[in-house]
Image (cartoon, grey):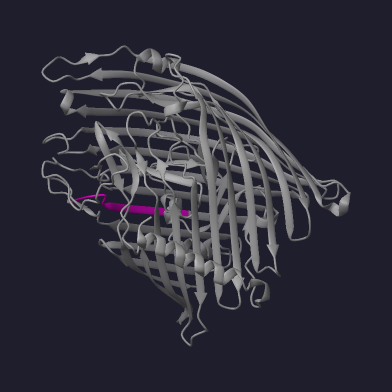
Amino acid sequence: MPFKQHHTHRLLALCCAAAFTPLAQAQGPALEEVVVTAQKRTELLKDAPISIAAFGAQDLEKKGITSLPDLRAAVPNLQMKPHPNSSASMLIFMRGVGNADDQATQDPSVAIYLDGVYLARSQGLAMDVADIERVEVLRGPQGTLYGRNATGGAINFITAAPELNQFNFKQALTLGSYNLRTSKTQINVPIGDSFAIQAAYLYSGQDGFVRNRGSGADRFGNRNRNAYRLAARWEPTDDLDIRYTYDRSLIGDTPAYLAAVPLSPDQGRRPDAGSPFVDHLRHFDIMTDGHALIADWTLSDRLSLKSITAYRRLDNTVYPEYLTGALGPFPAISGENRDKQHQFSQELQLIGDALDGQLEYVAGLYYFAEKADSSAYTAIPVTHGATDAVYATDNSATAVFGQGTYTPPLLDDRLHITVGGRWSQDRRKADLQIFTLPDNAAPQVGAPGHGDKTFNNFSPSLVVAYDLTADINVYGKVVRGYKTGGFNVRASSIARFEDGFDPEKLTSYELGVKSMLLDNRLSLNVAAFQADYRDIQVNIRSNPANPSNTDVLNAGTATINGIEADASARIGDALTVKVNYAHLNASYDRIVDATGTDLAPVFRFVFAPQNSYNVDVDYEFPKLPIGKLVATLGYNYQADVFSRARTDSGRYLIQDYGLLNARLALSEIPVGQGNLRVALWGRNLEDKQYYTDHNTALVPYAIFGDPRSYGLDVVYEYQ
């Protein structure tokens, strides 16, 4: 381990030891109890029998979390990698389960929700303009409480609803390294006693850290984003609350720089400039927008009905630029990808209790439909040819789901038994035609392909929880997750495309403890799990000369086990320490390719670090005449991860790294009838060079993480 990293580990370990050792004798304020709605009810985090990471509004601001990619370093066992075609698309892995591609013909393993609306595609998520009230990351299979199922987990973004009878205004500005400039404006206007409107606008821009020495855009990795959001809330009676939201996001980023690097254990150096042969580097053209109508109707003191109706669109055009100059004065791969997608979903939830509160239940109906038209033009100059794959997909899903928790009148109401289930039917249809465009030859039109499959599934769950005391809860859980089958537009042949692939299933066994101790000054939550993973949808590269060709086979079985631990401590009046740790051991038991060969000895789980952790230390200085001063030191670490599954084709490894961040914030500064907050921050203070992806496109490449950066946040709130 390098000296600097070892020194940082030791420093943080000493901080934690110094904090936790005297905790039992310490006096002072308690921790704030975290409230979550992961189970469709408002409950304390310590009472929810689930492995969950939750971030409130203050945590989100302190960590700089405004959108999906910002969670990458905040939650152990949650991994994200940028798609090499577009850094605006994130491929998500949780507990080692995830997708290595973003085709509309394949569902993700980790489900993303915005105010209960399932977001089928990850390109251009607009949630960074919203006033995010809370983010909940649910680890492990989900389905009995959600309209869509997922084998890896779910991420819920919950936004603040417009406030009735309350005018407020918020303006946030950020300036930082690499010409970072962000402006976010929000306003809430009440109209009468029962209606309110909330509006927001965001501009976010930053220069990439790799200069383009060729033509076109000046830098790789530029960020240029505009987002708008409008929300309205109407409460005509005490029993009915109706909320409408519209969001729109425009993304004009440039591609991330793919740097030619050696295979591990050698490590490439972070570049600051690209090849002079780059020809017309172009900005992306991505638009996504969506409407949502959410109605909560209180039918009685014990029963409520919730309706979530949503429609979303995506128009995505990106221009991949792979490794120009690595094989000569041309890119290894270049192209143009276009996607147009729209989706509609309707969910109904019946939430109630019976038997004098001893039975709590949720029952739901769900419908989802999406259509997409795409084209992927791919040129590989070294082979003197190109292809244009044109495809369309028509997907629909229906589901019935429910969960009930029974607390028998025994053992002082300490025992809680939860039974849930989800029946779902998925219909997948897809069409594909490939045009081959060789140099100096007539184009060749491939035979059209058509696929049509229907899948049915029932996924049950069982949880037994017991309150050892009012502050300590233990639970055991068995839950099954399911991800539907589909089609692979990058298949090696039309026949392989039409065959498609079947669903995969994961059964998870989990034991956990939730606790709030020492007069609410110490929170400790631990979960140990094992997952039996079957019929895994494995991507197998079938043509080494064309990295765009892969076959998806239900070829794998695997065992995944691990531990997740979250601890928070409040020491005295000033110091708060939070530690989140995850250990993961994921290995394939068997992978059989199309020839019947078992490839398990040469396959590894990708983006599944054996160890990862975060440490955050907050120190609150004595109250100042002008406001409250808080210093924050944060460190996040992850061990080595494989970034490409097959080890017989080279060692593609993202080597272990840790990032040190710091923030000094002065808040509660009175300005007029509002308050001002000012914060200085620094990220990757040790300027670590690390990969966020390491793979191959004819030659090995890496996408590097951001270098050291500094910035200033200024936030004014008028209420």
- Left/right of residue 126 with respect to residue 480 in the rendered view: left
Residue 573 locus on image (x, y percent)? 59, 78
User: Is residue 310 covered in magenta?
Assistant: no
Q: Residue furthest bottom?
A: 625
Type of secondary structure dominating the magenta stretch: strand
Q: Which residues are magenta?
A: 219-230
**Relative to 693, residue 228 above or below:** below
Report the residue at 34% width, 29% height from top. 374
- Left/right of residue 521 with respect to residue 171 in the rendered view: right
Report the residue at 63% width, 52% height from top. 526
Say which quadrant the N terminus sits in. Answer: bottom left
Asked whether the viewer can see residue 225, the reply is: yes
Residue 353 locus on image (x, y percent)? 78, 47
The image quadrant that residue 507 belongs to is top right
The image quadrant that residue 653 belongs to is top left
User: Is residue 227 covered in magenta?
Assistant: yes
Asked whether the viewer can see residue 189, the reply is: no
**Relative to 604, residue 250 above or below:** below
Residue 641 locus on image (x, y percent)? 42, 43
